[in-house]
Amino acid sequence: MGNDQVAAPEEAKPHIDFTKHIKLSGRSTSEVERQVTVCRYKTYVGFNFDQICAATQRGRLKLGEELGIIDIRTSKDAESTEENQLDRLEGDDHETEWVRALFGFISDKYFRWLDLESRDIYEFMIEGVLSETFLAEYYQTSEGEIEFLTYGGSQREDRIKAKHRSVFRMQFGAQLVEFPYEFVRTVCSRPEFRTNLKEIGYAPLGEAGYGTVDKSSMKTRYANTIDWTAERVKEILENPKIQISEFSARATIHHLSVRTSLNIRFHLTKRGRVTLYFPRIEFNRPMTDVERENEFYEIVRVAYTYITGTKNIKSSGTDKQREVTQQLSLDAFLEDV
């Protein structure tokens, strides 16, 4: 036979039925603690409801994709007009037409499993796991242009931009909208927030004595919060020469879909990001998984609107930018059906 060798047959792996160890979690009325960052993006493209709906349909999650849309809701198929009326009552100055797309990130998950009978450890992979969701809400500004909010997904911003370029034919002239310093100060100084301040970031801009202030001296004696009645803190809040760039506080949120009010932590930065930290949520009725995700992001939307006061904070885009981008037709960004 010479040097030819016959390879030994590979030892057959034992067949293990992992499915018997997989159980539905039964989270029909509860939701685990979650952290969500909300960002707002500005475009200078005219809002066209039908074309945005068509674009979101094209973006539905397909087999083999890592990112796509799971569910779509619009102002026209809302269950009642109360939700649209709510937008007006909350101070939004955009039209009531909106499109909300629930996105999902798909990935493979690797696990190690111990067989208690054989005492062997097995490594296995589950394909197509829904690892994360985020919601994008597209609406019309008072100038008739598209703005959109992303609820979650901020750590995957590059992939979200790529998805918008492919689905919406958007060259992503959309820009993240920052908050003006005065806006950050106004929100931070609101009575319901200043009494629950946890952290505050500021730039003294040459004001004597503020470059070396020990923040621990601002804390209250018996609680880990900033004492807003302290003279130094009051001056930070009231002196326009001291720019407040970020702060953390608590807010109480009410929503009809939950059994009790929610006490949430949030962190707002001048960079336009509001990060919300939610406790366990107990919904007041059973829901499907998709319904629960949509309802959770509706609570996030209410919390963000309550904290910022409005979704349509004026951006700092120049008139020249608007003139240039308005010369491009909407078809350059959204493909006709």
Image (spheres, rainbow, N blue to C red):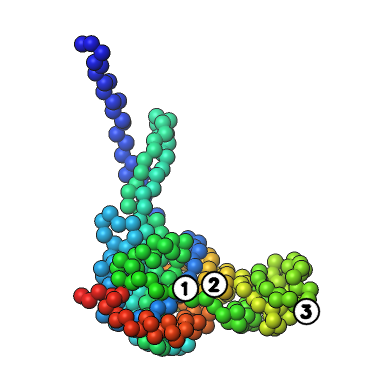
Amino acid type for the residue under numbered disc 2: Arg
Residue 193 visible in this rendered orientation of the protein:
yes
SS for dot 3: helix
Q: Which numbered dot is residue 64?
A: none
Residue carrying label 2: 271
Image location of residue 91, percent across then percent down: 47, 87
x and y, in percent, of residue 173 in the image: 39, 74
Q: Position of residue 88 (x, y in %)?
A: 43, 88
Q: Pointer 2: residues within 10 angstroms few (<14), some, or many (20+)?
A: some
Counting residues from the start of the chain, the first of labels 2 and 1 encountered is: 1
Q: Earlier in the sequence, mark 3 or mark 1?
A: 1
Foreground disc of the pair 3, 1: 1
Amino acid type assigned to the residue bearing label 1 in the image: Leu
Where does the image place residue 273, in percent across and percent down from the top left?
A: 52, 71
Task: Say which of marks 2 and 3 sits in front.
Answer: 2
Residue at image position (53%, 68%) is: 275
Read off the residue under disc 3: 231
> Residue 264 versus residue 168: which sits nearer the camera?
168
For mark 1, does the 10 Å Cα neighbourhood hold few (<14), some (14 to 19), or many (20 or more) residues? some
| Separation (CA) of disc 2 from disc 1 | 8 Å
Which residue is drawn at the image coordinates 25% and 16% (left, top)?
Answer: 5
Q: Is 65 positioned to the left or the right of 91 in the image? A: left
- Nearer to the camera, 221 or 153: 153
